[in-house]
Amino acid sequence: MKSQKERQLKQRAKEQRRRARKVRRNLSDAARLFRFISKQVNGLLPTLRPEHQITLAMFITGLLRSRNGQLSQIGRKVQYDHQKPSLEMRFRRFVCNPNIEVAQLYQPLVRQLLAAVGTDDPLVLMVDTTQMGGKCLCLMVSLYYKNRAIPLDWLVVKGKKGHLSQELQLSLFKRVKALLPTQASVVLLGDAEFDGSEVITWLQTDTSWQYVFRTQENIHIGYQGQQHSLKEWLLELEIQPLMETFLTEVTFTAEHQVPQQNIMVVWHEAEQRHEFLVTNCTTFAQAQGYYRLRYTTETLFADLKGRGFHLTQSRLWIPERLNRLLAVACWAYYLMVFLGVEAIFSNLFRELVRTDAFVHSLFQLGLMLLDYLLNEGLSFPKTIDLPPPKTITHYVISP
């Protein structure tokens, strides 16, 4: 039989191995990233229950490391003291929990974003719809920030690809309006899904926002005492290919009679055809300058889906559950945009990319800096406050 001394030596060796394993675990990439995110979550969401704070921090950590929308894949990239399937179930309980409100999770970041952008210049908002998860549609309003669109608020509903009702659109716009500073000038940009008469009437009567929406060529408008489709007006006004114009004092549409609208007719070089936009901007140049920023909402969806977090791979098909997963993804997206800005301010971008041909977005640069900090064992920033966009002097070209 083993002597007491041998048993003590064996127990001591076991304890030393356990401590060494704990030290290695605390130095792992997953542990370091979790501590950074946990600090931000705890600071911004102090009223969230502690167990939910931990779950949210692990959720964001796993999503950033896995870049996969499936809960099982997210769980595999998180340091956890128990079986991985139990962590997947923890995430599933989180997205299924009706007591966890998306607004509570994400609005602290919205307040930080709005504080960074300020009200000296107009707040440029983009609205668009995309498919996510299991046959769900996401209607999202985002805010333009230094060649990026950062989410402000969204709705997730069941449905296939297609237009959502004006009632749903207005419910989201009213929520967004409540988030914005009352003194801010606002510009809203969208494609032809959002040119409904109810939406434009609400914008005219209940807000002071400017807007630019693409519209269809078969829409009939009243102009100069006559009613024709926009396509017919091209012939009536003898607008040739390559030509552009700006029609003022238009009644939109002939059926719904929304007065005092303007129509911008632009030439689409790639498709060799004219496009039409309805707006209350007073000049062609103003409306065109704003509408050119709308592409950023498409890059946002690409970052949340195929080029970033692959939320299309999620197997969640109930809108309320996908809604909470999207809140986690928007947290992760915000963090990566912040790290992209941090890479520029710290000059670490010079270690990450070529500086003679800088073609990376803030989101991509953030992912690169995340990998760099983890690989090199460097410290994370203490806060995640975005600076005013005007202070970011390095020119970032969006792909």
Image (tube, rainbow, N blue to C red):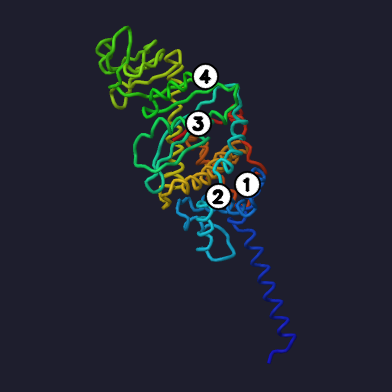
Of labels 3 and 2, earlier in sequence is 2
Decide: marks 4, 1 in contact (CB < 8 A)?
A: no
Q: Position of residue 212 (x, y in %)?
A: 43, 22
User: How crowded is the residue under tag 2: few (<14 C-alpha within 10 Å), some, or many (20+)?
Assistant: many
For this rendering, which residue is in front, 128 or 398?
A: 128
Quick check: 39 above or below 148?
Answer: below
Q: CA distance from mark 3 to mark 2?
A: 24 Å
Q: Secondary structure at mark 4?
A: loop
Q: Secondary structure at mark 2?
A: helix
Q: Secondary structure at mark 1?
A: helix
Q: CA distance from mark 4 to mark 3?
A: 25 Å
Of labels 3 and 1, earlier in sequence is 1
Amino acid type, residue under disc 1 in the picture: Val
Amino acid type, residue under disc 2 in the picture: Ile
In the rendered structure, the answer to whether residue 271 lies left or right of residue 298 reads: left
Q: CA distance from mark 3 to mark 1?
A: 26 Å
Q: Position of residue 185 (x, y in %)?
A: 55, 21
Q: CA distance from mark 4 to mark 1?
A: 35 Å
Q: Which residue is mark 4?
A: 208
Q: Which residue is mark 1?
A: 41
Q: Which residue is mark 3?
A: 147
Q: Is residue 60 visible?
A: yes
Q: Nearer the viewer, mark 4 or mark 1?
A: 4
> In which quarter of the view is residue 348 placed?
top right
